Image (tube, grey):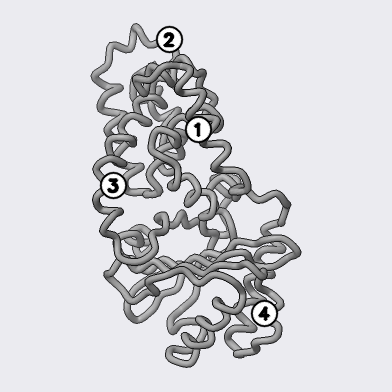
Amino acid sequence: MRPEAIFEQHRARLARLAYRMTGSLAEAEDAVQDAWLRWSRADREGIADPAAWLARVTARLCLDRLREAKARRETYIGPWLPEPLVEDLAEDPVERAEEVSVAFLLALQRLSPLERAVFLLRDVFDQDYGAIAETLGRGEAACRQLASRAREHLKGARPRFQVSREDAGRLVAAFMDAAARGDATPLARLLAEDCVLVTDGGGRRGAALRPFVGRADVLQFIKAFSWRHGWPPPGEARPARINGWPGLVLESPDGVQTLAFEPGEDGKLAAIYIVRNPEKLARVASR
């Protein structure tokens, strides 16, 4: 089989790994392209398992990018959110919602780069510890310890309950309707007590500089925002699947933005994530 054909068999899987590593679709695409270049130049006769080889190369490339991104993250203005993964509702979902939810990706980003690489290679992409140790230049025992620490940090990051996408969609519609009518009572009933609302403008567009935590804090933000701008924010709203769950792509006068909603227990919203940073929305704007 031609090297291009072999690589294409694994491209989507590598992109999923790179997106989870970096939280950026743009960085993921670059890492996968660099992996292709290395594959095209490699001595492929000596590669017994192309899938494992490509996953290890992609993970190393992502680690290099994460080191370069560290300084940018330290000076980032306001809360940081991953680049949204936007799909049309009519399409079959690319990923299970719990595997690409914003909450899970944020939890991954809180791991050290090495913990993240070991966890993803072992628990998500089923690499053996010997291969992971070779990839990262660490001992096998050290990699086992990194994986154990990562699992401990990630406890609770995946939802422990099941919510259908249909039920989640109805929850989002009810929330938007109550918010548009300024009806605080049903709005409060739709929000989990410990819900969060995070806006990411990256200093390039208006956004809150802190997360809003708890039902009362979120309601206060929505009330203040509605008083100033109206709710939903002005513009044309298009339903979409955002990081696995129903959400909205909003075409505002000042550019596109995404609203991602994540359900929690008891049929209430656990989180609302709003991405306004135009650097993270180029793909969305071109759809």
Q: Earlier in the sequence, mark 1 or mark 3?
A: 3
Seen at 38% across and 11% down, the residue is: 47
What's the amino acid at mark 1?
A: Phe
Residue 53: x percent and y percent? 39, 20
Check residue 70 in the rendering and tell me which mark sits there, or answer none: 3
Q: Residues within 10 Å of mark 1 (few under 14, many from 20)?
A: many
Seen at 55% across and 77% down, the residue is: 217
Q: Earlier in the sequence, mark 2 or mark 4?
A: 2
Asked if the residue under mark 3 is in contact with the one under mark 4, i.e. CB atoms within 8 Å, the reply is no
Check residue 48 in the rendering and tell me which mark sits there, or answer none: 2
Asked if the residue under mark 3 is in contact with the one under mark 2, i.e. CB atoms within 8 Å, the reply is no
Residue 100: x percent and y percent? 53, 48
Mark 2 vs mark 1: in front: 1
Q: CA distance from mark 1 to mark 3?
A: 20 Å
Instruction: For mark 2, give the secondary structure.
Output: loop
Q: Earlier in the sequence, mark 4 or mark 3?
A: 3
Q: CA distance from mark 2 to mark 3?
A: 35 Å
Residue 66: x percent and y percent? 31, 41
